Image (spheres, helix red, strand yellow):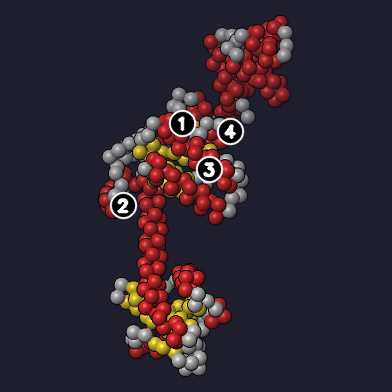
Amino acid sequence: MIIEKRTAKEIVLRLSDTIGQNINIMDTDGVIIASSDPAREGKVHGGALKLLRERLDRLIVESNDQFPGARKGVNLPVVFNSEVVGVIGITGDVGEVYKYGEIIKKMTEVLLLEERAKDLDVIEQKARDRFFNEWVIDGLEDRSPARFGALITALSVDTGIPYRIVAIAPFTNPGLSDDTHTEISRIVRRTVAKELKGNVFRTASRMILIIPERSVPRLDDVMSAIRSRILTSYSVKIKTGASDSGAVLHLTGAYNRAVAALERAIEADLPAPVTYYDPFDINYLLRDLAPAARKSYLDALFGDASPEVRSSALDFASVYLEENGSLEAIAERLFVHKNTVKYRIQKLTQLTGTDIRTCRGAYDFPLAAQIRA
């Protein structure tokens, strides 16, 4: 194991604060990689070199000119997994700092173990993220069944239960810093693991949740709490889309439906804590309709009417449909007389050749309202 400079600096800071003494950590080449005195970093510690080369269990430096780059104090080897990985030195009068020697050595080795455990956690999390990305997005179970089987065993992933896929993305502040993204991800990961027993991985623009099937109210409650905390802490409003139901093993379809629901939530700025994919919602059928097909449909309905006329007609048609054709309700909503509503219905029929009061009209106008630019 090699002691990273970042790790060494953290250890020096923690130990210096604890015992109030100047501390140095040297690597296996005797170079000071962290010190309470930053000016000494990068210099070779002659005493550490002697300790390493002669495999001493300690080295006492009696004066500042005894070894190049060394000052009086006590130096001890740092051992990790039975291997000397560096040297720690306590600067000061030998009689005063000698008593700290073994304590500091042991504390350093314990802190190295802690840092190693953190590194292993990060490595495991990255491995899980990569696995879930390949499984959920790329269909790993079909592409490479043998590798898929080996990974679910190594990572202890249960593939025999239904999972619902949830997609999350920030809806405001698109220029979030990496640190903020990391903090938001940490909130989501911890909450999802604790409250829903699920897993989370990140893509370039979204967080994807793989959650054992839970009731809709339960998922709504948890996601509402996450949204509230992120909004309060970072002034970031998030949108959430979820697949319509849980899927077992083959999750790519559920992922695509969750992303479609997320995009619907963003496009329409839907207020619900979670937008669930609805296979009967025409919006999902129309979202991928080619622009040329949209234009062709609207041209067939409105002919050569100007964009302004089309927009006004569809605005009126939308109100008519939302009020279920009630002349009174439409008139009240538009602040006009009922006779004006009747007149506008006639004008709409003349413009399009379709009566909105017929079954055909009840089909054509909602569709046109959905696909207009």
Q: Which residue is mark 2?
A: 155
Instruction: Point out the residue furthest to the bottom here.
Output: 66
Q: Nearer the viewer, residue 360 or 161?
A: 161
> Element at badge 3?
helix
Q: Is residue 349 visible?
A: no
Q: Which residue is mark 1?
A: 276
Percent across and percent down for residue 367 are 56, 21
Percent across and percent down for residue 85 are 37, 77
The amino acid pointed to by label 1 is Tyr
> Element at badge 2?
loop
- Disc 4 and disc 1: Cα gap in Å? 14 Å
Query: Looking at the rendering, which quadrant does residue 211 occupy?
Result: top left
Say if 335 sits above or below 270 in the image: above
- Disc 2 and disc 4: Cα gap in Å? 37 Å
Mark in front: 2 vs 3: 3
Query: Looking at the rendering, which quadrant does residue 95 occupy?
Result: bottom left
Mark in front: 4 vs 3: 3
Earlier-in-chain disc, 2 versus 1 = 2
Percent across and percent down for residue 162 are 33, 36
The amino acid pointed to by label 4 is Asp
| Neighbours of disc 4 within 10 Å: few (<14), some (14-19), many (20+) | few
> Element at badge 1?
strand
Q: Residue at x 49, y 41 (%)?
A: 226
Q: Which residue is mark 3?
A: 229
Instruction: Point out the residue furthest to the top here.
Output: 339
The amino acid pointed to by label 2 is Leu
**Contact (Cβ within 8 Å) of mark 4 with mark 3:** no
Q: Which residue is mark 4?
A: 269
